[in-house]
Image: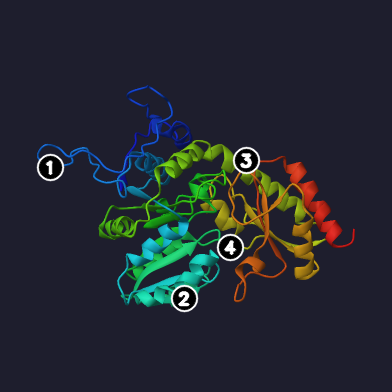
Amino acid sequence: MTDTRPPRRWSKRSLSAQAMGKVDPITRAVVPPIHVATTFIRDPDNRYTSGFVYGRPDNETVREAEAVLAMWEEASSALLFGSGMAAATSVFLALAPGDHVVAPTVMYWALRNWLLEDATHWGLEIDLVDTSDLEALRAAVKPGRTKLVWVETPSNPLWTVTDLAGAAAVAHAAGARLAVDSTAATPVFTRPLALGADVVMHAATKALNGHSDVVAGALCFRADDAFAQRAARNRKMLGAVLGPFEAYLLMRGMRTLDLRVRAASATALDLAQRFANHPHVAEVLYPGLPSHPQHALAARQMQGGFGHMLSIRAKGGEASAVATAAGVELWKRATSLGGVESLIEHRASIEGPGTPCPPDLLRLSAGIEDPDDLHADLDRALRRAHGG
């Protein structure tokens, strides 16, 4: 586990661009090397004063990337994992059998399935609720029994927004921790720990890496307490640590995080505004639009931007949505999000039976292409899907 308290002389953007300013002590390279060693020399007295014992839990490249992420989130410590699912499930596995958990009705589909189908085998009691409704959340927690409240904001793929300060107050009043999946918001726009959260999770595969070539996950902790130590032990004992090459690529991506996320968010807002009045679009789901029911909350909580993710609901239902996705050229029909390329997906087809995702919904991940090109491509596909 990396513990980092960097100086605040420079902005996060500057520190991230230079990977915390670390220079290789041997070559003086401005890009730190990849450390791939799996084992390390003991001291003559059999101690490991270097702090490195074995490659599974101990890797300098991983620690360097963790330091950048901990800096962004203003976290006491950070952990990198081999995937977002590995990071998320490690939080739940740090609980005890019999603990009660409250999670969102609308959230990342794979984690939702794991909670409903697998977490109960660990003895966890799971309740799903609309966490954007604080009264519903307050009614769902069980004081003394609820040990974790998990929220995702904005939520995938409907992009509802949960009041993090309010959710933290509800969780803490019940004696629970608040964990936040902040993948869509990124630390550029939202820092949940500063709003009262105890744990922040990222599917680092997405915007943190930003180049669609790394699968990774991350946890950031407000305090390096017993709960954080259990999550770290889970990573170590279950072998869920990120590899050094992947950590190197992730750190490369985080160097441009601020620029990429702001550019993609500006494009997402531009597209949301343009398609809000499109003749073949029934609704645009994006917290940056004044018509969004939680726009005021999003403007207060997501400082500087509203993220790169939006969804549109096609007039004509599922058939029109599928035909639209089939008709694009510049947009790429693919799962995932947060890369430099723009992606489109008919999400209900991916999630399958039981999904809360409307069948007419297309999920859009805005990249860094020319916004006019993206608009023209999707506009043509929508019109062709409706016989235009």
Kindly identify which numbered label has been placed on residue 263: 3
Q: In front: mark 1 or mark 4?
A: 1
Q: Residue at x 62, y 72 (%)?
A: 352
Per the image, the residue denoted by label 1 is 46
Instruction: Name the amino acid type tagged 2.
Output: Glu
Q: Residue at x 47, y 64 (%)?
A: 151
Q: CA distance from mark 1 to mark 4?
A: 54 Å
Q: CA distance from mark 3 to mark 2?
A: 38 Å
Q: Are marks 2 and 1 in contact (CB under 8 Å)?
A: no
Q: CA distance from mark 3 to mark 1?
A: 51 Å
Per the image, the residue denoted by label 4 is 160
Q: In front: mark 4 or mark 2?
A: 2
Instruction: Name the amino acid type tagged 3.
Output: Ala
Q: Residue at x 32, y 59 (%)?
A: 231
Q: In front: mark 3 or mark 1?
A: 1
Q: CA distance from mark 4 to mark 3?
A: 22 Å
* Residue 308 appears left or right of 248: right
Tell me which numbered mark, 2 or 1, is placed earlier along the sequence: 1
Q: In front: mark 4 or mark 3?
A: 3
* Residue 87 appears left or right of 357: left
Tell me which numbered mark, 4 or 2, is placed earlier along the sequence: 2
Residue neighbourhood size for the residue with mark 4, other residues' Cα within 10 Å, grouped as few (<14), some (14–19), many (≥20): many
